[in-house]
Amino acid sequence: MSYQHIRMPETGSKITISNGKLTVPDQPILGFVEGDGIGPDITAACLRVWDSAVEKAYGGKRKVSWCELYMGEKAAGIYGGDYFPAETLAAIKELGVAIKGPLTTPVGGGFRSLNVSLRQEMDLFACVRPVRYYSGVPSPLRKPEEVDVVIFRENTEDVYCGIEYESGTPENAKLAKFLREEMGCEFFEDAALGIKPISPFGSRRLVRKAIQYALDHNRESVTLVHKGNIMKFTEGGFRNWGYQLAKEEFRDRIVTEEELWDDHGGKMPEGKLLIKDRIADITFQLLQLRPAEFDVLATMNLNGDYLSDAVAAEVGGIGIAPGANVSDDVAVFEATHGTAPKYANQNKVNPSSLLFSGVMMFEHIGWQEVADLINEAFVKVMADKTVTYDFARLMDGATEVSTSGFADALIAKF
Ligand code: NAP
């Protein structure tokens, strides 16, 4: 495929995907989008760290060929005002793996969120957020080392679908009339109305991904998080379809919590994955009080949005939490924080969220040695208390460094 502004690197070759399995060459082409605001600062720092870790791990035998792709303000400059160029989407599809910095979204008007557009256009139906503790990172918990969860948030359904009718509009009046007169519903006059679609298809493919991940990574349990006690057919449906899918497609490898007690006397059989479910509100509480009880979590869009940030706050906040949006064919890794415009071009912020999104990316392509090197170097740098401003203000005796200085400190530990 030929592109107008994107330059595919001359060295390196593309990753191929067949039946969900990646074939990764020794010099894969990976896409990156720098992002807006603090995006250029953190991307430049991370590219140096990633390349250096790859070099250290494989001594030149493997190497990434980076391909810059454009979205957001940089794209608008290059493509005559187009913030979301079609060829960027095409290139991400062609490469199958990309990483991106944050992108600006105007509040209450302007163009639609580029992140939401990207997820919808490419049907990136699962948002994956691993949240774990790194020794030395400031945390409000007494035992932060017990936090080690991976949240799978459904990305395409729920109240986020945008099926909403503003109070006082003819569309709202039409729907309200139908609901009152034909469905016997009762609600206050002029209520704004929203629809919450949760489907078997959407629920099953998300739970499938979560279970497959848990099996591939030797995790102990998958918890389906829902408010099915109140929203019986939507959130309750998610729970029921999740259990159904687990039994239909993973029968030999899983045990449900009910089976654990009915058939196994509460003792987990060797080598099996536990599938359980919890109500969302108690999950929020337990993730603070007894985080060790959770491992992989699978949930719908709204619960997942809140849960991801709440858990991330327990172990260092959004400056460090990584994430990815994935389908069966494409994975886009991304910093989970925004563009923090007040810090743009100051070489000041923490690059760790993007850095660890890169760690996820290297794990995704099977380059575990690179991921391990970065994780180990990070712990050493934390032990030295060499940190960016956000952690420095939470630590006694820290040495505050810039974004690029933090990258240098990591590289020095390889
Ligand atoms: P934000 O950019 O995440 O920044 C909020 C605050 O979080 C910052 O002021 C800073 O806190 C802290 N922070 C964020 N990134 C940090 C980092 N790398 N290191 C250290 N601290 C960091 O959220 P926002 O101000 O609400 O949003 C700004 C823009 O980003 C909006 O246009 C929004 O739509 C967009 N956004 C994009 C994404 C995405 O692309 N995935 C996600 C969220 C928001 P202190 O002020 O306390 O230092």
Image: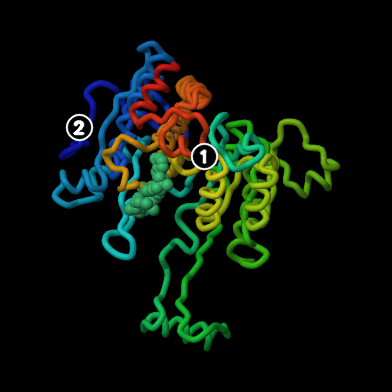
Indicate the quadrant containing the N terminus: top left, top right, bottom left or bottom right.
top left
Taking depth in this image into account, of 372 and 195 the one nearest to the observer is 372
**Secondary structure beneath disc 1?**
loop
**Residue labelled 2 has its Cβ within 8 Å of some atom of ligand 1:** no
Residue at figure coordinates x 39%, y 19% from the top left: 411
Q: Position of residue 141 (x, y in %)?
A: 63, 42
Q: Is residue 200 visible?
A: yes
Residue at figure coordinates x 46%, y 41% from the top left: 323
Residue at figure coordinates x 47%, y 36% from the top left: 391
Q: Which mark is residue 316?
A: 1
Q: Residues within 10 Å of mark 1 (few under 14, many from 20)?
A: many
Residue at figure coordinates x 31%, y 28% from the top left: 29
Q: Which mark is residue 7?
A: 2
Residue type at the position of mark 2: Arg
Taking depth in this image into account, of 289 and 165 the one nearest to the observer is 289
Find the residue positioned furthest to the bottom: 181
Indicate the quadrant containing the C terminus: top left, top right, bottom left or bottom right.
top left
